Amino acid sequence: MPEIINCAAYSDGCSTGSIELKDINNVLQEANQFVWIGLYEPSEEVLNRVQQEFGLHDLAIEDANTAHQRPKIELYGDSLFVVLRTAQMNEQHHAEFGETHLFVGANYIVAIRHGSSVSYVDVRAQCEQNPQLLKKGPGFVLYAIMDFILDKYYPVVQDMEAELENIEDKIFNDKPSRATTEQIYLLKRELLEVKRAVSPLIDICNRLMRFDLKVIAEDTRPYFRDVYDNVIRVNEIVDNTRELLNTALEANFSLISISQSEVSKKFAGWAAIFAVPTMVAGFYGMNFRSIPQMDQPLGFYEVLLATLASCFLLYAIFKRTGWL
């Protein structure tokens, strides 16, 4: 996959065509134009060229180069640096996470993708179909990318909700098992990763909506309320799923404990039943001169019958009380 996915200039909301990195400086000097660049895991050389063209801060470039950053928003002079985490489900129905780093200026936006992430070609196409909105500048492009990233979280959390329902069915309809506990643990880990990716976006949206950031036009800030609402909704779904998952884990442990208790009661019941013939056999096995019923012709059978009757009586009692 090429490092530079797309590099185009826009004037009054309409694309003026693709441009080369070396021509960016000339485009930036023209009024009512901005540049939108899309990069995928760029090399240090490409990042250095981008830094020289836009005058980006060294620390922001270092973060964009190393990746593995937490979601955040930072202001370096007239440039805004935003880090977002992306998420999508793979074929094994496990969440895969990536990163998107955004440099936003008055007349440019640079989107850098790392790891597992869906291309923003569709975002660019949708923006180009709405020139009246795209003419708002890089701030609106930032909103469109953030909204696209948040939309990709819904299939992830919905898949996790479906997996939670599957776990609940296994807990209450099937026999509790260690495999179910492991499945709960893996889902809890994935939910924690989603939580770490989503919860910082609340603060990011608040800053974009309420703080005086010159790179975000006044008429663009209301659009970030829509992103904020999506963030709150996804965050609530994650919190609710985590809470239900904790409850499911406790229920699984409780049912396992109850199952073990039922087994223990059965063992205790059968042990009590077999204790009767063991006691009688041990008693009559003693080497005494006078043992009850031993001098009677039917004494052996009477003792045997009494022993069996006692065993059946205990069995009936334990069966009635639910021990067997």
Image (tube, rainbow, N blue to C red):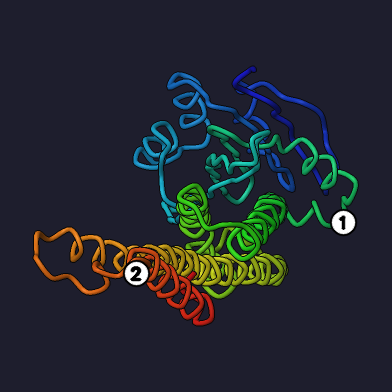
Q: Is residue 297 visible?
A: yes
- Residue 305 on image: x %, y %: 43, 69
Query: Pointer 1: residues within 10 angstroms few (<14), some, or many (20+)?
Result: few
In the image shown, does 153 or 257 lie closer to the viewer? 257
Are discs 1 and 2 less than 8 Å apart at CB? no
In the rendered image, residue 53, in percent from the top left (x then y), is placed at: 52, 30
Horizontally, residue 142 falls left or right of residue 316, namely right
Which of the 4 quarters of the picture holds residue 237?
bottom right
**Mark before the other along the chain sequence, 1 or 2:** 1
User: Considering only vertical position in the picture, is 136 above or below 119?
Assistant: below
Q: CA distance from mark 1 to mark 2?
A: 102 Å
Q: Residue at x 57, y 57 (%)?
A: 175
Q: Name the residue rendered at 80%, 53% in the picture.
A: 135
Indicate the secondary structure of the residue bearing disc 1.
helix
Q: Which residue is farthest left? A: 288
| 47 vs 139: above or below | above
Residue placed most toward the observer, 177 or 28: 177
Answer few, some or many: residues within 10 Å of disc 2's Cα (few below 14, many 20 plus, some between 14 and 19): some
Q: Quadrant of the N terminus?
A: top right
**Image height check: is 140 above or below 246?**
above
User: Which residue is at the front of the view, 175 or 21?
Assistant: 175
Residue 303's tag is 2
Residue 197: tell me if it is visible: no
Look at 72% across and 52% down and name the residue there: 155
**Res. 132 mark:** 1
Report x, y in % for residue 103. Answer: 54, 44
Q: Nearer the viewer, residue 263 or 304?
A: 304
Q: Which mark is residue 65?
A: none
